[in-house]
Image (spheres, helix red, strand yellow):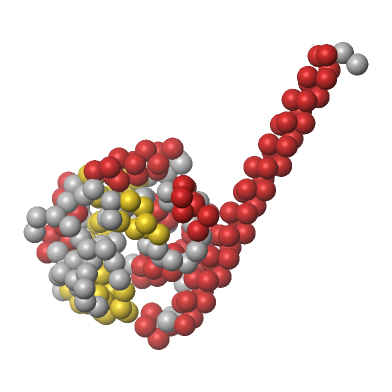
Amino acid sequence: MSIRRLVSGAVLIALASFWAWSMGVADTYSAARQQMIRLIEQDVRETSIYLEKSALDERILKSLSEVPRHQFVPADVRSRAYDNRPLPIGYGQTISQPYIVAIMTDLIAPRTEHKALEIGTGSGYQAAVLSRLVKKVYTMEIVEPLGKQATERLKRLGFDNIEVSIADGYYGWKEHAPFDIIIVTAAASHIPPPLIEQLKPGGKMIIPVGSRFMTQQLLLVDKGADKEVTVRQILPVRFVPLTGEH
């Protein structure tokens, strides 16, 4: 047998081994994502009295089952990426619990023609989940390193209908307003008036309100066609605080 044939055989074996390894990793993450979905569904059933529903829109669950959450967490916690719990992402911030991502997304009822605003990009995970459900996502992050990392990550992973701004989300993104839906992923002491103003009549906003050291409440804000605003309290939550000079 020639040296060239031996080398070719070794290369083929190495490639086959790498393919088998990579498929094994993919299968592991796929199974973990499906388990995560089952845990979300269980939590939804257990909190159905608060949500006023016992199951979420299948489109939201499909998006969660396809977005690779392990790509949105630091390497040292990647093995826990699909646990149904928040995880640290640096700079005192976290990636939200998958159940919370799921219900917040479901409650604002995203549609394919919607333009969405997210306040608190973090790692970019919530924006990625939302991007599969709407036409365009505008997302704002006040922590510059996180904003830059999220911009690079979302671009690398092919989420091309998301635009990131490194700015104080309290004031919204006036240039692209009004928005059909707004999702706020950090707790504010009150509902920011600029966000109410930038919400389209007929639109919905979901926002946690309360301080770091007191019970926060997840609020669903509806802006009627006549611009009348109604607020529904959903359930108690715990989020990192919205930061900025306001």
In the image: residue 62, left or right of residue 12: left
- Residue at 62% over, 59% down: 31
Q: Position of residue 114 (x, y in %)?
A: 33, 56
Q: Position of residue 221 (x, y in %)?
A: 24, 72
Indicate the quadrant containing the N terminus: top left, top right, bottom left or bottom right.
top right
Query: Which residue is the extreme one toward the bottom?
Result: 49
Residue 127 located left or right of residue 218: right
x and y percentages locating residue 209 in the rendered image = 21, 71
State the residue in front, 187 or 159. 187
Camera sees residue 53: yes
Residue in the image at 50% along x and 64% along y:
83
Residue 183 pos. (x, y %): 29, 62
**Is 113 positioned to the left or the right of 120 in the image?**
right
Quarter of the image for the C terminus: give it. bottom left
Left-right relation of 169 to 133: left
Using the image as rendered, state which of residue 115 and residue 221 is in the foreground: 221
Q: Residue at x 78, y 21 (%)?
A: 8
Which residue reaches farthest left?
Answer: 246
The one nearer the camera, 217 or 136, is 217
> Which quadrant of the structure image shows residue 227?
bottom left
Residue at 47% in and 76% down: 43
